[in-house]
Image: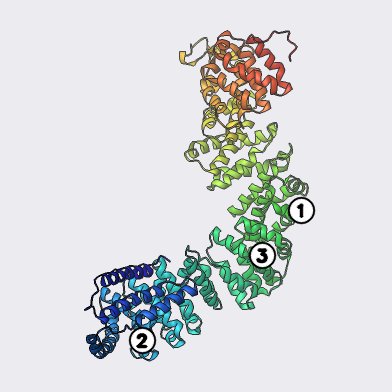
């Protein structure tokens, strides 16, 4: 392994080998036995250091290195000269004295030496321990373990690693050495090493794991600040050895419920879930209560769900006593915020149990209604709830029987249910059972959240309602809805109210009259003036709804209503919506402009005689209508500056507004003005845009665009300029397009002189 200690050992070994080779090379008759022995022992010490650093090699290799280490440390060479024989006895005496001196020196250097002195003292101690040159008595007598632990707190990185290795070695020798490391101070020093570099943290967690078989260690370690957080970090880290040991240590600590809660706070939930599944009743309640109170991220909620927390919590709620039910519901409420957990809740069969609780009149269970309804509101976000067809109707019947907080959750749940794409049958059933009449009284509620929930639900239920909506709402509630729009300070509530009004049928003149008398138009203009500076999802819905309401006030059959709308200033806003609105808002704005423009020609004619007294300004002359046009009186698209933004929509990537835009542009192609109209469209690059719609648009949009192009290509100038552009696309569409388009395509190809009028190809 490439660790600091192994690198250090190998470097020392290399140095000693160089010295040994030099000694061999230069050896002669006067080279002393003592020199050779010392050099050999130097190599042995390096091997001893290497043994400390390598833990992951095979036992066989460790044993071979260990045997060589011992052999080299105890080496004795035959004396080759009389002189050496004479000195042998004296050398042995000096050696013993030196070793005794070295032992004392090692202790002093470890206690008080600087970093460099400490380094060599630790290497010496490693050699002493590896060669068993001293016994346990000496280790105890000099209090080596406390000395090492204390020095660990102040030493530098490399020395800390060596100290940890020595401590691990001593801990493996006997329990007495372990006992000297278990006081809070020593453990705190060891815990600090968990947060250091990879090698040090690996050795520190290994040592703590070795100590954890002592009960006092398990009791104390979890209380040391940051310990569990660091252990969880190591568990999730990249070092497999540290991760393995951290996992085992956390498992050893998991018998302590307080430690388990600290683990959960650090994002490690497995022990907590284990207690939920197998712990005592009090332990389960403690764990569930903790989940209910934690500030969880979505990742934490996902982890708890994946670890299996939902099932035991549902079991606690279904069959536990009141305290267990309360804690379990709180936990489930927190977990149900995540969509993945919602599916697990549905699969657990909890929905029926929650509804049963909500219908319960037992006073002791009343406190559980709020979390139960909140969980239902979360579950309702999943379409899988639609499997239970009765759920929405049962929730609806509970509305009038519940307290405000429960009503809010139930309304949120119902809104989620009816908003699902596949919920048309549920919506229909709710309307059949009088849902709209049941919800209307909530529009007069003082509680904004309840009022908004009811408005949203009415909006969702009436999106696909036939023409009887006005009868359902009645004049009273239509005025109440307008009042909400004009007085509410809540943007979401305004959006829901506008949305509900936008569902009114275009053909319902009675509803439009009520809204006109309630002064909805000035309210809309005031809203648009103050609220188009920002773009949010809520603002998007607001603009879509406002644009939908304006369609009611621009129906071509009521010129007086159109005139009123124009005088209020809606036309510039409709043009602006073509640029700032969503595809739906653009489509609705284009529809209103189309409805207004349908009457432009007749309004211009009827007003011509009145202009004879005072000649209008040249800027008001319209090249399409060949009259003097004003926006508020003739609703002219040209003077409103609507042609370019309409064309830009066709040039864009979104296709939702194409049909409405083409409907608006088509009003410039009416019989009396189509030549001038086609010129105006061409000037705004509209012909290229029409050809593009023919290529990529829907079938209805293709049909509308082709009808316009058929007239446009009657004009020679347009045939010359744009014929080549359209030719390839038209021929391709003639071969591959819908049969209903072929007749119009044929006419255009005739204009482009690519097909004889009598051709039977089509």
Q: Quadrant of residue 468?
A: top right
Question: Which quadrant does the N terminus fall into?
Answer: bottom left
Residue at image mark 2? 133
Q: Position of residue 306 (x, y in %)?
A: 61, 62
Question: Which quadrant does the C terminus fall into?
Answer: top right
Q: Quadrant of residue 462?
A: top right
Q: Nearer the viewer, mark 2 or mark 1?
A: 2
Asked whether disc 3 touches disc 2, contact meaning CB atoms under 8 Å apart, the reply is no
Of residue 86 and residue 597, the one placed in the foreground of this image is 86
Mark 1 closeness class: few <14, some 14–19, many ≥20 residues within 10 Å: few
Is residue 226 in view?
Answer: no
Of residue 417 and residue 37, the one placed in the foreground of this image is 37
Q: Position of residue 6 (x, y in %)?
A: 38, 69
- Whether 478 is drawn above or below 717: the answer is below
Tally of numbered tags: 3
CA separation, marks 2 and 1? Answer: 82 Å
Q: Residue at x 36, y 79 (%)?
A: 72
CA separation, marks 3 and 2? Answer: 74 Å
Residue at image mark 1? 389
Q: Earlier in the sequence, mark 2 or mark 1?
A: 2
Q: Quadrant of residue 3?
A: bottom left
- For numbered disc 1, what is the local secondary structure? loop
Is residue 359 in view?
Answer: yes
Residue at image mark 3? 369
- For numbered disc 2, what is the local secondary structure? loop
Q: Earlier in the sequence, mark 3 or mark 2?
A: 2
- Whether 126 is drawn above or below 563: the answer is below
């Amino acid at each position: 392994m490439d660790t600091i200690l192994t690198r250090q050992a190998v470097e020392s070994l290399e140095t000693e080998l160089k010295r040994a080779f030099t000694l061999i090379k230069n050896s002669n008759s006067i080279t002393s036995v003592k020199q050779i022995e010392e050099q050999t022992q130097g190599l042995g010490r390096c091997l001893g250091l290497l043994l400390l650093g390598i833990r992951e090699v095979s036992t066989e290799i460790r044993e071979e290195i260990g045997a060589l280490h011992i052999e080299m440390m105890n080496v004795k060479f035959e004396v080759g000269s009389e002189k050496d024989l004479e000195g042998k006895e004296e050398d042995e005496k000096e050696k013993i004295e030196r070793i005794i001196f070295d032992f004392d020196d090692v202790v002093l250097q470890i206690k008080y030496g600087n970093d460099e002195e400490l380094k060599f003292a630790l290497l010496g101690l490693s050699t002493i321990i590896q060669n068993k040159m001293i016994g346990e008595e000496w280790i105890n007598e000099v209090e080596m373990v406390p000395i090492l632990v204390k020095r660990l707190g102040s030493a530098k990185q490399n020395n800390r690693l060596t100290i940890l290795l020595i401590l691990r070695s001593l801990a493996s020798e006997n329990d007495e050495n372990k006992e000297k490391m278990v006081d809070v101070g020593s453990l705190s020093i060891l815990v600090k090493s968990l947060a250091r570099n990879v090698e040090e943290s690996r050795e520190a967690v290994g040592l703590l794991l070795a100590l954890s078989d002592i009960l006092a260690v398990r009791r104390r370690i979890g209380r040391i600040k940051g310990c569990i957080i660091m252990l969880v970090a190591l568990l999730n880290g990249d070092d497999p050895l540290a991760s393995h040991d951290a996992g085992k240590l956390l498992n050893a600590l998991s018998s302590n419920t307080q430690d388990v809660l600290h683990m959960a706070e650090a994002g490690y939930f497995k022990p907590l879930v284990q207690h939920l599944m197998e712990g005592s009743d009090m332990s389960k309640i403690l764990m569930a209560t903790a989940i209910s109170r934690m500030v969880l991220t979505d990742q934490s909620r996902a982890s708890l769900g994946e670890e299996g927390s939902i099932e035991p919590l549902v079991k606690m709620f279904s069959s536990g006593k009141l305290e267990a039910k309360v804690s379990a519901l709180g936990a489930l409420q927190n977990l149900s915020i995540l969509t993945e957990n919602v599916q697990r809740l549905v699969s657990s069969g909890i929905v029926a149990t929650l509804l049963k609780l909500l219908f319960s009149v037992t006073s002791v269970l009343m406190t559980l209604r709020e979390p139960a309804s909140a969980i239902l509101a979360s579950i309702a976000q999943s379409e899988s709830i639609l499997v239970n067809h009765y759920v929405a109707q049962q929730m609806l019947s509970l509305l009038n029987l519940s307290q405000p907080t429960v009503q809010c959750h139930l309304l949120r749940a119902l809104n989620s249910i009816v908003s699902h794409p596949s919920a048309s049958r549920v919506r229909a059933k709710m309307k059949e059972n009088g849902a709209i009449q049941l919800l209307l009284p909530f529009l007069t509620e003082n509680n904004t959240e309840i009022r908004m929930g009811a408005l949203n639900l009415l909006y969702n239920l009436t999106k696909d309602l036939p023409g009887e909506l006005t009868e359902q709402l009645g004049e009273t509630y239509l005025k109440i809805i307008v009042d909400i729009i004009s007085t509410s300070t809540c943007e979401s509530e305004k959006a829901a109210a506008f949305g509900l009004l936008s569902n009114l049928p275009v053909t319902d003149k009675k509803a439009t009259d009520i809204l006109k008398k309630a002064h909805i138009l000035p309210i809309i203009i005031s809203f648009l003036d103050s609220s188009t500076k920002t773009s949010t999802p809520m603002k998007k819905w607001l603009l879509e709804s406002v644009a939908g309401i304006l369609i009611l006030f621009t129906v071509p059959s009521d010129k007086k209503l159109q005139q009123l709308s124009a005088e209020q200033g809606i036309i510039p806003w409709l043009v602006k919506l073509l640029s700032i609105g969503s595809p739906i808002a653009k489509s609705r704005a284009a529809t209103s402009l189309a409805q207004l423009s349908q009457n432009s020609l007749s309004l211009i004619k009827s007003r011509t005689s009145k202009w004879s007294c005072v000649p209008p300004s040249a800027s008001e002359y319209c090249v399409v209508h060949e009259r003097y046009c004003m926006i508020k009186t003739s609703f002219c698209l040209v003077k409103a500056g609507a042609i370019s933004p309409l064309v830009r929509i066709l040039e864009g990537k979104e296709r939702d507004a194409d049909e409405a835009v083409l409907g608006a542009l088509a009003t410039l192609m009416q019989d009396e003005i189509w030549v001038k109209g086609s010129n105006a469209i061409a000037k705004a690059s509209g012909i290229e845009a029409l050809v593009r719609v023919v290529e990529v648009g829907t079938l209805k949009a293709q049909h509308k665009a082709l009808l316009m192009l058929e007239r446009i290509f009657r004009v020679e100038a347009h045939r010359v300029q744009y014929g080549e552009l359209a030719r390839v696309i038209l021929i391709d569409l003639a071969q591959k397009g819908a049969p209903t388009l072929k007749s119009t395509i044929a006419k255009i190809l005739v204009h482009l002189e690519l097909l004889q009028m009598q051709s039977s190809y089509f």
